[in-house]
Amino acid sequence: MAPKLSSVAKTAQLAASALKSNAVRSSLKYSGQYQALRMINGTRAASSPAEKKTITIRDALNAGLAEELDRDDDVFLMGEEVAQYNGAYKVSRGLLDRFGERRVIDTPITEMGFTGLAVGAALHGLKPVLEFMTFNFAMQAIDQIVNSAAKTYYMSGGTQPCNITFRGPNGAAAGVAAQHSQCYAAWYGSIPGLKVVSPYSAEDYKGLIKAAIRDPNPVVFLENEIAYGETHEISEEALSTDFILPIGKANIEREGTDLTFVSHSRSVKFCLEAAETLEKQYGVKAEVINLRSIKPLDVPTIVESVKKTNHLVTVEAGFPAFGVGSEIVAQVMESEAFDYLDAPVERVTGCEVPTPYAKELEDFAFPDEPTVVRAARKVLGL
């Protein structure tokens, strides 16, 4: 009688089988691509070019994952509830039915265990996409991420790559309190060997998740739980299965001449809203830079914008000390952009406090549009 396998052993067996299996793909070569696009909300196959197509962040991620699973048999998705439950946030819905349990794998609740398993699979040549239910839980696996995934390529003299994508919601959601609300952009951004991305729009999410999966380096993909249900416009180009955004290149969401906002993730939304308010109330034209990538950081785009506007405000939801904004300020100080500043740089951040559970206090703990406007007025002397 064959011994009964534990959940952990089954998970390891499924991952290992991907090395040996060359299962024949569907004869419908582009069926996965069709299904990925079919899931997009509000988009009809017969939409005219004049109509603006929209998509939720959730569906953009789902489409990107589906396209990469369809494209490369070495790619597999693993994490808690990603398969039978369709993902804790329904990002992976439908993927188990389409790609099977060899490619979409439920894990036990053991971040340390399944992260080590995924890193090992990556070191053996596979391309795991590992979902954390929240990046707060990834602290249980910090050794595997930092010491194994990030450092092995260097320590092996460039002979052992580790193609793995760590993804999941980062930062605060709503009412999840101190232990589920931390932003890890600065944590992972400080580690040599890791690439770190923090998308804002639907196009960011789709283009960057595909780039992360294809990148031969370990990539930390920081999502936002509240953003999953938000809808963004999307271009025809971004609907293509060939759409990829380069890691390390920021995007200017709004051009301006008087002030530069630099932000990432959902805080970009508040910068865009603040820019509208500043133009309506004061005639100020603010430029909004969406970083997209935390590491590598697109310093040249920031420098060129500051040289044009002469004023800079950084906006993030993370803690104030040693944050992404602090690094941007240091980079500007060390560049030629410093000579173009007409006022000190202002940082807008989350508060120096563990995230409160009470809604009234939680609302005070993170930046919003009025907070960003106040910072801009201070820098401009309005």
Image (spheres, helix red, strand yellow):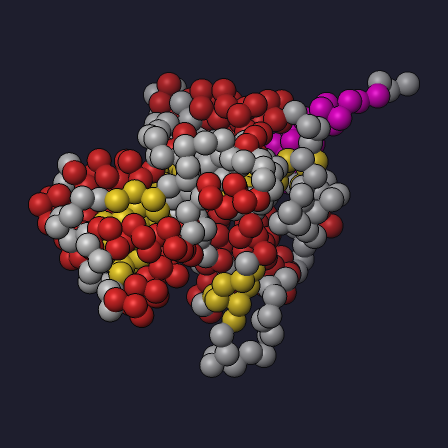
Q: Quadrant of the N terminus?
A: top right
Q: Residue furthest left?
A: 339
Examine the structure image and report whether residue 212 is included in the region drawn in magenta. Answer: no
Q: Residue at x 24, y 69 (%)?
A: 283
User: Where on the picture, by quarter, is residue 4?
Assistant: top right
Q: Residue at x 50, y 46 (%)?
A: 363
The answer to whether 220 is drawn above or below residue 273 in the figure is: above
The answer to whether 30 is drawn above or below residue 122 in the figure is: below
Q: Is residue 82 left or right of residue 154?
A: right
Choose between 269 and 185: the one closer to the eye.
269
Q: Is residue 157 left or right of residue 106?
A: left
Q: Is residue 109 left or right of residue 176?
A: right
Residue 247 in sight in this render: no
Q: Position of residue 55 (x, y in %)?
A: 55, 63
Q: Position of residue 34 (x, y in %)?
A: 61, 63
User: Tag count in the figure?
Assistant: 0
User: Where on the picture, by quarter, is residue 126?
Assistant: top right
Q: Position of residue 302 (x, y in %)?
A: 23, 49
In magenta, the rendered stretch is 4-23
Choose between 86 and 88: the one closer to the eye.
88
Residue 256 in sight in this render: yes
